[in-house]
Amino acid sequence: MEPSTPHRLSYAFAKEKGLVVMTDREPLTVGVRTGADPYGLVEVRRVMGQPFALEPLEPTVFERHLSETYGRNDLDGEEAEAALGLESDLESLVDGIPQAADLLDGDDDAPIIRLINGLIYEAVKRKASDIHIDPFEEKLSIRYRIDGSLQEVLTPSRRLASPLVSRIKVMSRLDIAEKRMPQDGRISLTLGGRSLDVRVATLPTRYGERVALRILDTRNALIGLDQLGMDEATLGRFRSALSQPNGVILVTGPTGSGKTTTLYSALSLLNTGSVNIMTLEDPVEYGLEGISQTPMDHKVGLNFAATLRSILRNDPNIVMVGEIRDVETAEVALEFALTGRLALSTIHTNSSAGAITRLRDMGVESFLLASTLRGILAQRLVRRLCPSCREPYQPSPDELQLMEMASEDVPTLYRPKGCLACGNTGFDGRLGVYELLTVDSDIRKLIHSGANEGEIEQVAFRDHDMLFQNGLRYVLSGETSLEEVLHVCRREGWADGGV
């Protein structure tokens, strides 16, 4: 058996025989899965060429060590270009690829495949949400979206664009001959036993097709409500809204602010087994056990409004609609709530009160909104400061004014610096910022009377935090910077110093 990884045991061999080199152990130690093939140790002894200790591992512990230990070396631009020199027929290489292939298997795969596997593996390791592949005149730009910001990781020659995009299109079952029209597809993969879905979108550009890959990791998405980072007061009020037997609950915010994760967490809480929960999504991002999920298909007329009318005959107790985009979808969802059921959805607005204005602008009647809305949650994600390099400083008078703090009460704030641990970005991970508008009798009267956004906010947030105030708790605890909260939660009027 030829050495094929830095650990000198191939992933396929380690997984089959139940043996893994423990890279964090001294002296050299091999983890042995319960029920592993003992004859495999003979081969390990021959390959390693030195004595080693044994450590028994439960199957779940073994799988975790296997995923953490194995991974491909990153390919830089020169290696990627060298891959083209093999003149491999990409189509013949992928003819026999199954619907779900393991990224860490197949040491003899073509270099172009190893490059894609390495890109996806590295993206998962660095907790990237997207991979952007952009062809330009002289180069191919490959960037990761990490914590909401794009970071360039690879700039090989543009000659690599065509075979790379073709390979991705074949993996996602797209038409490789069609280069003039946008296409959408999906790749199902496993990474060391860890299931991943990669959503693929292609778009023609001046210098070729660009590709965006959205990495959907179920392990990171399906989390409990108490893990979202809500403060105790907001979490309690949101749980109370979800406990209502009927009505509409909306989650609002820009793209990439975690709305879908919040809705999935809410559905997991509501999924007790005694209620019929159905979702309409475009597309279905993560599979939820015990919940009926329907993907939209606009080619055959399967849109939110039409499908929502149809599933009402399936006797659902709770329905989640991926997004309210038009008045028809909004009215069907609100009418569904009037029949004594609970509806959850998202809408793109900048604030919770702004969702009411948006629905009115669509053409939804105020009396219908007043009688059905139960709660509107606005949310953002702010980047968490890297704990290894965050830099303390004393805020300026202008910053104290923005924070509405007295000049004699000066706290210590922190700002990003950058180090090797965070890739010189100064940030590591993200935190949720929330404002929850609960529709009580006072708010219901305001909605029914046609009150504007400012009037509704004045009453709704007399005793509760809005987005900026909610984000300040992270600033004062040193978890993020004031600049980050201002950037993410900025609203009209702040340029003049008002919050």
Image (cartoon, rainbow, N blue to C red):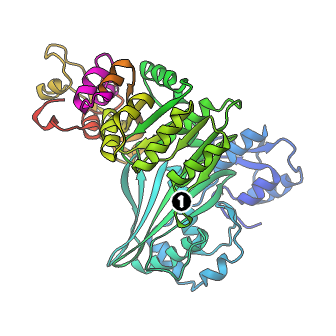
The residue under the point 37% across, 56% down is: 151
- Magenta span: 447-474
Q: Position of residue 321 (x, y in %)?
A: 52, 45
Q: Position of residue 4 (x, y in %)?
A: 67, 64
Element at label 1: strand
| Identity, as a three-letter code, of the amino acid under mark 1 | Arg
Is residue 253 found left or right of 260 in the rendered image?
left
Q: Main secondary structure of the magenta part?
A: helix
* 423 lies above or below 301: above
Whether residue 350 can be seen here: yes
The residue under the point 58% across, 62% down is: 186
Pointer 1: what residue?
199
Residue 136 included in the magenta stretch of the image: no
* 212 lies above or below 332: below
Is residue 92 found left or right of 44 in the rendered image?
left
The residue lying toward the viewer, choosing from 302 and 19, is: 302
Quadrant of the rendered structure where residue 476 is?
top left
Quadrant of the rendered structure where residue 318 is?
top right
Residue 462 included in the magenta stretch of the image: yes
Q: Decide: few, some or many residues near mark 1? Use Cα within 10 Å; few <14, some 14-19, many ≥20.
A: some
Q: Position of residue 116 (x, y in %)?
A: 55, 67
Whether residue 55 can be seen here: no
Q: Position of residue 283 (x, y in %)?
A: 54, 55
* 468 lies above or below 187: above
